[in-house]
Image (cartoon, rainbow, N blue to C red):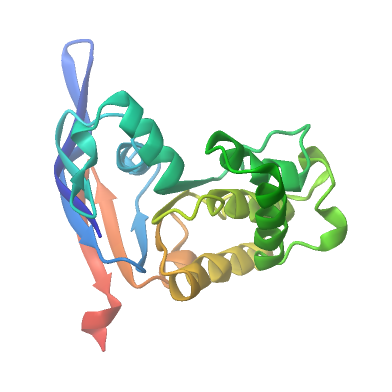
Amino acid sequence: MLEVRNVSKQFKSGDHTIKPVNDVSFSLEQGTFAAILGKSGSGKSTLLSLLGALDKATSGDVMVDGVNVSTLPDGKLTAYRRNDIGFVFQQYNLVPNLTAKENVMLPMEFARVRRSERQARAAELLEQVELEADVHDRKANRLSGGQQQRVSIARALANNPKIILADEPTGNLDEQTGELIIELLRSLTRTQNTTVLVVTHDMALARKTDRRFRLAKGSLAEEFDRSRAR
């Protein structure tokens, strides 16, 4: 379970104090597909960075299965990012001169998984995200946007994370490809029991989720919970 308790992030800008995330609290059961909506500059990406331990909250706690991530020392934070969290970015963030398969293998290399196991799992994951076999050995910079995003999702799954954090995962994709990526992310919650949290301004994506929140001026409010709507 992911629990966010009174999390805030603030910083100084001249004489002003900016709070992109202000006293945010919510929880997600394992296997939930959730979305956080909000306009550009509303604090969505900042919140995602706090949940993934890419940035540190000014106050509050982020709990994953009862462990307070906010208080972990640097070494354990690195392990948390490597083992418990998978990141999917709008810009894909692939290594351009590595192949699709090599990009997926990379997190497993950092986790010291044997090469033969890395190769086998990378091939399995690329097949799972329905990337054609003939492009597994193609360099990332020669892949289409939709293909790159599939590789990005496969890479996020490499170390069997509990949670996938996706920042505008359909933002650079055409409508048809975006719908395929949404369905792929949603299927992960059903088949892998992975918690998937996306930040987006795309209502088409948000309508497919189990729970929907809106972030405005740093504050979060829940708009929809599918289990309560039944």
Whole-percent x and y of residue 205?
48, 65
- Residue 19, x across and y down, in percent: 20, 31
**Residue 95 or residue 112, whichever sits in front:** 112
Q: At 20% across and 59% down in the image, what residue appears?
A: 27
- Relative to the observer, which residue lies in front, 57 or 65? 65
Q: Residue furthest top?
A: 14
Residue 143 position in % (x across, y down): 79, 47
Above/below status of 191 relative to 167: below
214 relative to 139, above or below:
below
Q: Nearer the viewer, residue 132 or 162?
A: 162
| Residue at 71% over, 65% down | 127
The quarter of the rendered structure image containing the C terminus is: bottom left
Taking 6 as reference, is 117 left or right? Answer: right
| Apparent side of residue 5 relative to residue 157 in the rendered image (left or right) | left
Residue 166: percent from left, percent from top: 47, 51
Q: Quadrant of residue 213?
A: bottom left
Q: Residue at x 48, y 55 (%)?
A: 160
Left or right position of 87 against 105: left
Q: Identify the residue at image location x=40%, y=70%.
A: 209
Quarter of the image with the N terminus in it? bottom left
